[in-house]
Image (cartoon, rainbow, N blue to C red):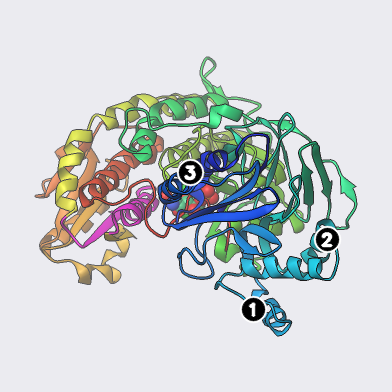
Amino acid sequence: MCGIVGIIGREQVAPLLVDALKQLEYRGYDSAGVATLQDGVLDRRRAEGKLVNLDKLLKENPLGGTIGLGHTRWATHGAPTVRNAHPHTTPRLAVIHNGIIENFAELRAMLEKDGYVFETETDTETVAHLVTRALDRGLDPVEAVRETLPQLRGAFAIAIMFKGEDDLLIAARNGPPLAVGYGDGEMYLGSDAIALAPFTDSLSYLEDGDWAVLTRSGVVIYDETGATVERPVQKSAGTAFLVSKGNHRHFMEKEIHEQPEVISHTLANYLDFSKGTIRTDAAPIDFAKIDRIAASACGTAYYAGLIGKYWFERIARLPVDIDVASEFRYREMPLSKDSLALFVSQSGETADTLASLRYCKQQGLTIGTIVNVRESTMARESNTVFPTLAGPEVGVASTKAFTCQLAVLASLAVAAGKMRGTINEDEERQLVRELSEIPRYANQALRLEPQIEAISRDLSQVKHVLYLGRGTSFPLALEGALKLKEISYIHAEGYAAGELKHGPIALIDESMPVIVIAPYDHWFEKTVSNMQEVAARGGKIILITDEKGAAASTLKTMHTIVLPDTPEIIAPIIYALPIQMLAYYTAVFMGTDVDQPRNLAKSVTVE
Ligand code: M6R
């Protein structure tokens, strides 16, 4: 989940590499580095921590040269120190890598036996020495890489630059994504289209097993058999990817506020507002012929899928098995060919979700993916892509991608209900009308921001928080806890409200805030009973409900956040907003790095 970039250009590349790394920093920010080649000589600058440190270093001690590599790291092997920062070099080359070389220990032992001296604890350095060893034996760079690649096991996107070779970059992909960018007398490499957006919108994507030899005049791509192959050159959204915070303090704040608009764009893709129906082209899958859905995803996307399960099962009477992808991929669950394999992912690159997708594909299932990045690997490998139109999400904590995923899942559940005859035309129209109201209700929810900011000040003083909910509010409780812990570092747990008395109630005392998500739905009374149990033990309740719920509850709460009364199907989407704002403002009060919380990365391309 590091970000990599390579340029063979005409201008000085170091500042350009830093520009590209700015777009890639969401993939990791433990350290950053660039290497360039000037007059045939390799040189590099590396800095611990965020890219600003590298930028500063380069300003103090610039690097010349029109060919170079850049890397932003999410540490896997070895601490996030300067020594372990990429690019890694030998006297003959510089290499950058995203992924994990699984057999690095045995390769390292073999290379050390041959006299190669390692400077770092990284797995990447084995690639540097393996290729160097081949060069030392007299092979040219292309042959050296050709010989090295079959020796590597694991997931990698790598790029190599060679001493004395001013017009050559070699790259390879096995797992994590890698794009080749085409310029005018210039060529580029990058982990994704966003990285290359400052330079070009003409891209081709390497497939697994591909490796590419770039010069200023073009690229030759080989597949894993060594045969030359053509990969289509596509136009990406190019500079449209370039995003800024605008007037917001953080990307997360901006992305929370974008939700009414981007949900509306997403819905327009699935709903025919004028007819009040699901668009016929929105779900090119015959849900009537499907016996169940096998779904998997990670993190927030998994919680979106979990909410989708409630919708598919209730509205379309279609059973959904859902699992976190890191478990699903190894569980060897029996799968029926009549099932739809459904994946949910913002990035479309998450390693475990992608592996689950490939597993299901091997088993012969139809693959549908709800994905935000249209050019991602998952999108390219799916039979059907259900796009979310959230736009680029930069904050590591997922917000707008989550609510857009929910908008898609709800629309698909209605489509499935219609196809399976579990809802009639009137019910379809009613549900579509309710879905089309999400943007309006989301705007109303955003108006609660000042109150939520005030509540968050209290929350920032505590050490632990419990989130409770029933029905679709249960996965939302899990999401609320994830959001809070990932950006504020406050320990939080989400529970199904009914599970409270099976253990977690032991944690309740006066110092434990309990955030109860309870719209006035058919679970409300039961959730209120669980709130009573918390109150009886001195727990401090923060109730998130609607006007009817607030009127019906007589319990004393620490705070009550009152949303408008919403139709039941859209409640999880609207209630997500106060949940996100609570986490956001708590983190702001704690003074954490909201957009780039410690130890995390936006796109998790290692397992
Ligand atoms: O790109 P994906 O949606 O596949 O990513 C999945 C998770 O890594 C992601 O949702 C993660 O949990 C976020 N940090 C949550 O805010």
- Which of the 4 quarters of the picture holds residue 193? top right
User: In this orientation, does residue 250 appear?
Assistant: yes
Task: Kindly identify which residue carries mark 1.
Answer: 105
* Residue at 66%, 62% in the rendered image: 155
Crowdedness near tag 3: few (<14), some (14–19) or many (≥20) residues, C-alpha within 10 Å? many
Q: Is residue 599 above or below residue 215?
A: below
What residue span does the magenta drawing correspond to?
461-489
What's the amino acid at mark 1?
A: Ala
| Element carrying mark 3 | helix
In the rendered structure, find residue 311 and report the number of the disc placed on it.
3
Front position among marks 1 and 3: 1
Q: Tell me if residue 128 comes above or below residue 36 in the rendering.
A: below
Residue located beneath label 2 in the image:
146
Pick whichever of labels 2 and 3 is earlier in the sequence: 2
The residue sitting at 32% across, 40% down in the picture is 575
Query: Which residue occupies 32% across, 57% down?
Result: 485
Count of marks overlaid on the render:
3
- Relative horizontal placement of residue 460, taking residue 433 as reference (left or right): left
In the rendered structure, which amino acid carries the disc numbered 2?
A: Arg
Nearer to me, 151 or 88: 88
Compare marks 1 and 3 and give the one earlier in the sequence.
Answer: 1
- State yes or no: discs 2 and 3 in contact (Cβ < 8 Å): no
Q: Mark 2 packing: few (<14 Cα in 10 Å), some, or many (20+)?
A: some
Was residue 573 drawn as part of the magenta stretch in this picture?
A: no
The answer to whether 316 appears left or right of 463 in the picture is: right
Image location (x, y in percent) of residue 154: 68, 66
Which residue is outermost to the top? 274
Q: Position of residue 110 (x, y in %)?
A: 72, 81
* Image position of 602 (left or right of 469): right
